[in-house]
Amino acid sequence: MGIVHLVTWNVNSLNARLEHVQRYLKQRSPEVLCLQETKLRTEAFPQEVLESLGYRSWHAGGPGRNGVAVLSRLEGQELFRGFPGEEDPQAAERILAVKFRAFTVISVYVPNGSPVGSDYFLYKLEFFYRLRELLERHFDPQRDPLALCGDFNVAPEPIDVYDPELLEGQICFHERERAAFRVLLEWGLHDALRLKHPGRAGLFTWWDYQFGAFKANRGMRLDHILLTNPLAQALSEVFVDREPRSWKKPSDHAPVVAVFQLPD
DNA sequence: ATGACTGGAGTTTCCAGA
């Protein structure tokens, strides 16, 4: 298998960001790119454009403003979308699992949940517990090589936000959200970035469009690549690819990249 | 520079995003 580059990127509309995605695929040629917030209906997904760049694609979209996708140069097949067996149209646009020969990838877009304390906030918290149950039913964290990638809309630790005192209790940095995220990890997932950069502050993946936030690096680490043991063992490098955030008309998120050295 | 968000829906303004 050799070296595999796995990327997750919330593009904030694939329609608005298609040129950026094309540029990214040409420049970086990752083996797998997980996208969130495609904001596209199934029939509007630009499959041919991506194919012309050598990428197969799987997309879970709909009429909503969500939408997740997996693009890959590798052969694969869809395992499931949403929470299997549950009637939840929103989740069906937020979870997509694709199985490749050497590993399985899930692209996930966790609900924002604002405002704090609302029904939507509770739905967000439940989303994490339901994700854990889904993993429990389908995977073994010690044996199955799985990467759960996406926009979790949670900064896990104080070092993951630019001002923890200011942001404490606000959306994406509320203790209940962080606790729900930990419950998910406790099933048996490793936060890839923290495996390689433990304790390092200022590594953000999202910056507000307003207030010159990116320039001042006032951001949050909301996008994560979570790995079961077999993939954690094969991990060689993890970084936030800040360059696309500096392009003209960018997404407000930057890609997160994990590099693996997989046995042949 | 006496200021400064974006995309989508649907219509010229509002909502959600985080």
Image: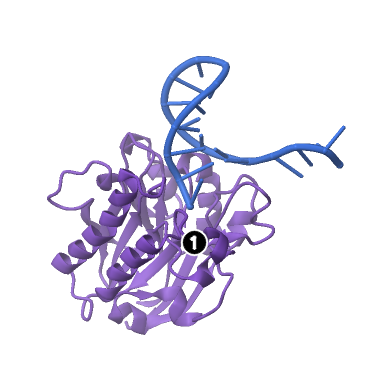
Dot 1: few (<14), some (14–19), or many (≥20) neighbours within 10 Å?
Answer: some
The quarter of the picture where the C terminus of chain A appears is bottom left
The image shows a total of numbered marks equal to 1
Query: At numbered mark 1, what does the secondary structure look like: helix, strand or loop?
Result: loop
Comparing A45 with A168, the one in front is: A168
Find disc 1 in the rendering and name its residue. Answer: A168
Q: Is residue A254 left or right of residue A31?
A: right
* Horizontal and vertical percent position of residue A125: 30, 56
Please tell me which residue is depicted at 16% across the width and 43% down the height of the picture: A87
Comparing A86 with A245, the one in front is: A86
Q: Is residue A167 left or right of residue B1?
A: left
The quarter of the picture where the N terminus of chain A appears is bottom left
* Horizontal and vertical percent position of residue A134: 19, 61
Disc 1: which chain? Answer: A
Q: Is residue A154 left or right of residue A84?
A: right
Comparing A13 with A56, the one in front is: A13
Q: How is the image coloured?
A: by chain
Please tell me which residue is depicted at 22% across the width and 81% down the height of the picture: A142
Eyeballing the image, is A189 above or below A12? below
Please tell me which residue is depicted at 48% across the width and 81% down the height of the picture: A196
Instruction: Confirm whether residue A109 shows in the render.
Output: yes
Chain in blue? B
Amino acid on which the number 1 mark rests in the picture:
Glu
Eyeballing the image, is A264 above or below A54? below
Chain in purple? A
Q: Quadrant of residue A89 in the image?
A: top left
Please tell me which residue is depicted at 38% across the width and 65% down the height of the picture: A178
Instruction: Confirm whether residue A73 shows in the render.
Output: no
* Horizontal and vertical percent position of residue B3: 75, 37
* Horizontal and vertical percent position of residue A167: 53, 59
